[in-house]
Amino acid sequence: MTRTTKTETKTRSRRRVAVTGALGVAALALAAVPAHAKGAVDLTAPHTAAVGKTFTVTAHGNDDAASYMRICLEDRSGGHAWHQVACGATVARDAGTEARVAAHTKGAHRGSLEFRAVMYGLTSPHAHPVRWRTSNVATVQVR
């Protein structure tokens, strides 16, 4: 058997206290992480379209964190800034319906058009909208 000195015993106890304290801090940090709300935005657009012909772009989505929701479609071409094309009606989350929007648009010239849907959250039906989510970009090749 080995004999331990007082300094070795003190060192071991300090390590135990330090490890226990670190585990306690880690547990508190994990408990303090906020829960993320569930939600999604889906965008539907054709892959190709003929020049001058009308095509439809639709989007729908929801978010558990917003009391009221509105979804809008934006487009751009040539890598320029995004422009709002259409917005759907403001809907209440309590109603159990998704926010929806549809836009009928046409490509005026050859090239690619990019579309995205933006979900806005509102605290009341007439409140200022706050951007919550953005969909992936859908590209339409105009030929």
Image (cartoon, grey):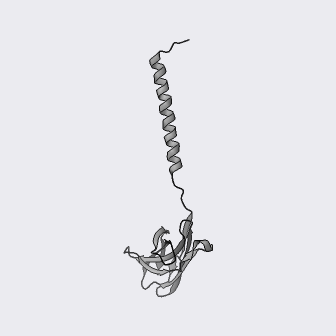
Q: Residue at x 54, y 56 (%)?
A: 35
Query: Residue 95's x, y, as percent?
Result: 62, 74
Name the outermost residue toward the bottom.
52
Residue 33: % across, % down: 51, 52
Viewer-proximal residue, 94 or 77?
Answer: 94
Vertical order, 105 against 38 (above or below) = below
Q: Position of residue 121 (x, y in %)?
A: 50, 71
Q: Is residue 39 left or right of residue 18?
A: right
Q: Quadrant of the N terminus?
A: top right
Instruction: Identify which residue is drawn at 44% across, 18% down.
Output: 7
In the rendered image, the vertical position of residue 12 relative to residue 35, given as above or below: above
Quick check: 51 above or below 15? below
Residue furthest to the right in view is: 96
Q: Nearer the viewer, residue 134 or 45?
A: 134
Residue at image location 48% in from the left, 81% down from the top:
86
User: Along the horizontal axis of the image, is 137 left or right of 39?
Assistant: left
Q: Position of residue 27 (x, y in %)?
A: 53, 43
Front in this rendered view, residue 29 or 142 = 29
Count of labels in the image: 0
